[in-house]
């Protein structure tokens, strides 16, 4: 420009871009110079104040050949005062502007992605201050973006809460990437919300580099509450499966399979009136959880009745656990009933669960309950009443839900009078007594029982057995059967073994009436008792307790027998 501001000269490029003459009069059409269109001050003011002006604008030329070009171009215009006017230089920066717009578009797109992400995202500068917080982070923590940006994440999620203060600020893993420029991943951490609650998270802290220099970090975190709950549920399920597996294995050790094999499980054979009455009583009591006491001679099927009660009860899907109280020594019966801890006594090399624990949820069958020692009866009474006990050598109280079925061939009431059985325990187990009829009182059932045992023998011995002769059947019905059903089964099996045909012969297998010995002279009751006890002790070689002891044969408690021996002056 010249000293006269009304004169303007433009070079060939200006004339080319904007289709103007190289000689223009500014006073005539200032708007003809496009890069002056948006100046805040008139050109005269710019020249007078000698200001350096940088002007950016998207320019559109007049109608003409280059209009489409100008519409896409951007120019940087610098106006510099000179001694004779001013000089204006315009630079085409369209390429830079397009790149800038492209970057802005990408930045906006990336911001949309970050805002839509389901994970919480924090941007951190080199001082650990938050520079970015996405909506997911706000939703998870309750801390607003405005309240978080510029502050430290540690102060909100860790340091201000006692449960999270184990990380000093300078050691918090959130800032590890800022320190060493490496990626850090934390699998199990806790973030605290604004409302004071907390939730488990896993997060990754990744360093950010700018022109090769560490400039901050981005922290991406995820709420893993559902995963933690799923892991806990899975762990709980595994523990339950493990416990059930262990329990099943232990129950199998305790006759779980034996109970279901080689027995008429739930099948009571007989049509006689005593049997029908017994079955009716079984049906009535099975539906309850009442304690049952089964009374009867040896061999009458007391255990079979116990199984029938259990099978018809609501506990049928749980185990029926049996313990023969007369077959276990007095020193071990408590361990068998209640279990023991490791080291409780010599030979206790490990923890062992007792029958009460194994029968939890099911039924415990106490066979020969009259043989229990008095000190064990005390603990049994508490276990039945309170449904709780301690293992031998242990202090922890174990609670169970067990139904008790007891059986005995003893006269428990007589034992109570003699002091061999606790009265309170007797009344506790004698809630619903069932009397087993001996076979001699139900001889009409003998043919049915014989047929059943023959079928068993046919399968057991592989012989084509068809039945028994009428004579043999009559003999069986006339016999008194002191051993009851067990003795009948043994006779049929012996006959099956000896049989060479299809029809069994039992005449020679039953005691002959002619074989009855001459009766001994009458003696006093005391002398007769003394003689009988001595003979029994001689037979057992002085053994009193146990299944082969004299007390068992005599039908007495071992302590009762010892008391009788002392009273009668018997030394053996």
Image (cartoon, grey):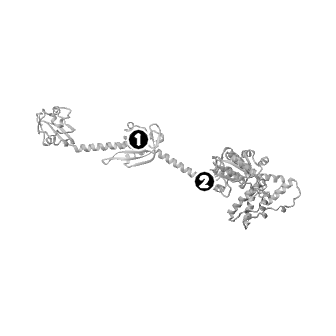
From the viewer's side, name the closer residue of 307 and 276.
276
Res. 455 visible in picture:
yes
Which quadrant would the C terminus be assigned to in this image?
A: bottom right
Neighbours of disc 2 within 10 Å: few (<14), some (14-19), many (20+): some
Which quadrant would the N terminus be assigned to in this image?
A: top left
Please name which of the two marks, 2 or 1, marks the residue nearer to the observer. Answer: 2
- The residue pinned by badge 2 equals 248
Residue 546 lies left or right of residue 525; in this view the side is left
User: In the image, what residue occupies the spot 59% across and 53% down?
Assistant: 246
User: In the image, what residue occupies the spot 67% across and 44% down?
Assistant: 386
The answer to which quarter of the image holds residue 130 is top left
For residue 137, which numbered disc appears in the image?
A: 1
The answer to which quarter of the image holds residue 535 is bottom right
Residue 222 lies left or right of residue 509; in this view the side is left
Residue 114 coordinates in the image, percent (x, y): 36, 43
Neighbours of disc 1 within 10 Å: few (<14), some (14-19), many (20+): many
Residue 379 coordinates in the image, percent (x, y): 70, 47
Residue 7 coordinates in the image, percent (x, y): 11, 35
Instruction: Farthest residue to the right: give it.
Output: 521
User: How far apart, in angstroms, are the residues tagged by discs 2 and 1?
Assistant: 49 Å
Residue 6 coordinates in the image, percent (x, y): 11, 33
User: In the image, what residue occupies the spot 43% across and 38% down?
Assistant: 142
The tag earlier along the polypeptide, 2 or 1, is 1
From the viewer's side, name the closer residue of 502 and 73.
502
Residue 3 lies left or right of residue 467; in this view the side is left
Residue 347 lies left or right of residue 7; in this view the side is right
């Amino acid at each position: 420009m010249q000293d006269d501001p009304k004169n303007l000269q433009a070079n060939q490029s200006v004339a080319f871009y904007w289709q103007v003459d190289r000689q223009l009069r500014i006073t005539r059409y200032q708007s003809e110079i496009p890069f002056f269109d948006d100046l805040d001050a008139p050109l005269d003011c710019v020249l007078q104040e000698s200001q350096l002006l940088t002007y950016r604008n998207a320019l559109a030329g007049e109608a003409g050949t280059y209009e489409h070009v100008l519409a896409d171009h951007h120019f940087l215009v610098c106006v510099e005062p000179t001694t004779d006017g001013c000089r204006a230089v315009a630079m085409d920066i369209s390429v830079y502007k397009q790149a800038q717009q492209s970057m802005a578009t990408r930045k906006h797109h990336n911001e949309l992605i970050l805002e839509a992400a389901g994970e919480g995202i924090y941007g951190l500068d080199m001082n650990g201050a938050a520079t970015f917080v996405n909506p997911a982070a706000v939703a998870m923590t309750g801390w607003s973006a405005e309240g978080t940006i510029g502050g430290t994440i540690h102060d909100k999620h860790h340091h201000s809460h006692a449960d999270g203060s184990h990380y000093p600020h300078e050691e918090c893993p959130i800032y590890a990437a800022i320190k060493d420029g490496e990626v850090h991943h934390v699998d199990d951490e806790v973030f605290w919300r604004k409302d004071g609650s907390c939730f488990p998270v896993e997060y990754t802290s990744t360093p950010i580099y700018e022109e090769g220099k560490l400039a901050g970090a981005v922290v991406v975190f995820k709420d893993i509450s559902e995963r933690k709950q799923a892991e806990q549920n899975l762990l709980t399920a595994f523990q339950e499966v493990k416990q059930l597996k262990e329990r099943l294995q232990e129950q199998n050790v305790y006759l779980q399979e034996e109970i279901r094999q080689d027995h008429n499980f739930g099948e009571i054979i007989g049509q006689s009136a005593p049997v029908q009455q017994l079955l009716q009583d079984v049906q009535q009591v099975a539906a309850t959880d009442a304690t049952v006491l089964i009374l009867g001679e040896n061999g009458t099927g007391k255990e079979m009745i116990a199984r029938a009660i259990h099978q018809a009860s609501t506990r049928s899907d749980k185990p029926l656990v049996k313990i023969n109280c007369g077959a276990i020594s007095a020193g071990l019966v408590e361990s068998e009933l209640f279990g023991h801890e490791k080291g409780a006594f010599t030979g206790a090399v490990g923890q062992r669960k007792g029958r009460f624990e194994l029968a939890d949820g099911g039924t415990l069958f106490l066979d020969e309950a009259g043989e229990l020692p008095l000190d064990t009866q005390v603990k049994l009474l508490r276990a039945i009443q309170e449904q709780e006990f301690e293992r031998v050598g242990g202090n922890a109280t174990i609670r169970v839900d067990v139904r008790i079925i007891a059986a005995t061939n003893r006269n428990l009431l007589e034992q109570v009078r003699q002091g061999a059985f606790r009265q309170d325990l007797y009344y506790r187990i004698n809630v619903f007594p069932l009397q087993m009829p001996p076979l001699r009182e139900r001889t009409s059932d003998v043919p049915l029982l014989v047929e059943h045992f023959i079928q068993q023998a046919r399968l057991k011995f592989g012989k084509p057995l068809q039945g028994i002769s009428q004579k043999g059947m009559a003999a069986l019905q006339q016999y008194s059967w002191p051993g009851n059903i067990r003795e009948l089964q043994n006779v049929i099996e012996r006959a099956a073994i000896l049989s060479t045909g299809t029809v069994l012969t039992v005449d020679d297998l039953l005691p002959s009436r002619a074989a009855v010995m001459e009766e001994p002279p009458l003696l006093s009751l005391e002398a007769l008792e003394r003689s009988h006890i001595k003979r029994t002790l001689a037979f057992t070689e002085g053994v009193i307790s146990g299944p082969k002891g004299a007390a068992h044969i005599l039908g007495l408690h071992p302590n009762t027998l010892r008391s009788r021996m002392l009273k009668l002056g018997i030394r053996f």
